[in-house]
């Protein structure tokens, strides 16, 4: 058990809908990362938050957004869903960002993922 | 751009045989490298990491990896594979707040 909790484990929805994925980081971790794993794109970094603020952005669509709350949990919101959004979405957490904490504090621990199926 | 290449999509070995999974990276400076394992229905579990120092790194579950700068490689090895090692293995390089992953190698283990 990595200590990172993701809910729900599975989500089935229809095209055009909106869903929210939730992530609770390991105790003491301030950074949260979201990744998407799909058959055609592999594992892709979406976005990172550190202590409530957006810190880095990757290949995240405009229809997707995220936030990190004061209690450090994070939510990834996916809207206007398309069939191609079906994927496994992972959350990871680490102690802090690389630039200030050094890479040792950026070892990322992953949750079990949320499998999203868009029908 | 930094990238990670795992040349083998699928590897099959017999239980008890040795294993080597290949990983090549493209990165100018000293890379920070990781191996993660994903078992069916599970998340990604960290096996090993390389930051600096000794180029042979021991990880969990009996795995080790060797960093070879001259070959831009960070191959994962295990002397004797167990059936429970069947999973997908990902090599990754850390680059400015994110991990860049390879495409993964699926390991199948025959009894």
Image (spheres, helix red, strand yellow):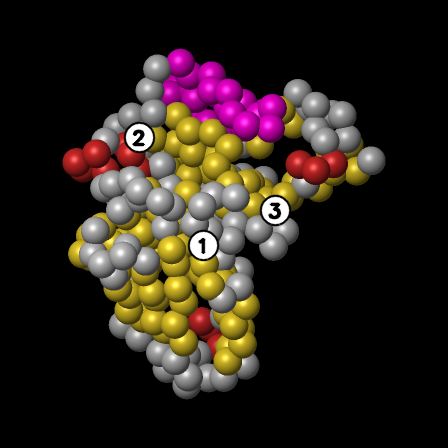
Q: How far apart are marks 2 and 1 (CA)?
A: 22 Å
Residue beneath the point at 60% across and 24% down: B62
Answer whether labels 3 and 2 touch (C-beta < 8 Å). no
Q: Looking at this rendering, what residue extends furthest in the right direction?
A: B111
Residue bearing the label numbered 2: A104
Q: Nearer the viewer, residue A84 or B72?
A: A84
Answer whether labels 2 and 1 touch (C-beta < 8 Å). no
Task: Please state the extent of the stretch shown in magenta in the rendering.
Answer: B54-77
* Whether labels 2 and 1 share one chain: yes
Identify the mark nearer the N-term, 2 or 1: 1
Badge 2 element? helix
| 3 or 1: mark nearer the eye | 1
* Vertical placement of residue A5 versus A17, above or below: above
Badge 3 element? loop
Q: How packed is label 3: few (under 14 Cα within 10 Å), some, or many (20 or more)?
A: some
Residue bearing the label numbered 3: B39
Badge 1 element? strand
Q: How far apart are marks 3 and 2 (CA)?
A: 25 Å
* Whether labels 3 and 2 share one chain: no
Residue B36: where, in percent of width, then height? 50, 39
Residue A110: where, in percent of width, then height? 44, 47
| 2 or 1: mark nearer the eye | 1
Q: How packed is label 1: few (under 14 Cα within 10 Å), some, or many (20 or more)?
A: many
Residue beneath the point at 49% across and 84% down: A14
């Amino acid at each position: 058990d990595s200590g990172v909790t993701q809910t729900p484990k599975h989500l089935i929805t229809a095209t055009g809908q909106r869903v929210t994925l939730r992530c609770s980081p390991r105790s003491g971790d301030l950074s949260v990362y979201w990744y998407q794993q799909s058959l055609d794109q592999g594992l892709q970094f979406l976005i990172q938050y550190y202590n409530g603020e957006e810190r880095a952005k990757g290949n995240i669509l405009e229809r997707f957004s995220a936030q990190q709350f004061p209690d450090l949990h994070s939510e990834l919101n996916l809207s206007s869903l398309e069939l191609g959004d079906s994927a496994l979405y992972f959350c990871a957490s680490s102690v802090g960002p690389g630039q200030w904490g050094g890479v040792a504090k950026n070892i990322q621990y992953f949750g079990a993922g949320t499998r999203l199926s868009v029908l | 751009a930094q990238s990670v290449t795992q040349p083998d999509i699928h590897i099959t070995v017999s239980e008890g045989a040795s294993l080597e999974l290949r990983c090549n990276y493209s990165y100018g400076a000293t890379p920070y490298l990781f191996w993660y394992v994903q078992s069916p229905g599970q998340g990604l579990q960290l096996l090993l990491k390389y930051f600096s120092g000794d180029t042979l790194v021991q990880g969990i579950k009996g795995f080790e990896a060797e960093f070879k700068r001259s070959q831009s490689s960070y191959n994962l090895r295990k002397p004797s594979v167990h059936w429970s090692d069947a999973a997908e293995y990902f090599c990754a390089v850390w680059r400015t707040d994110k991990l860049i992953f390879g495409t993964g190698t699926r390991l199948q283990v025959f009894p």
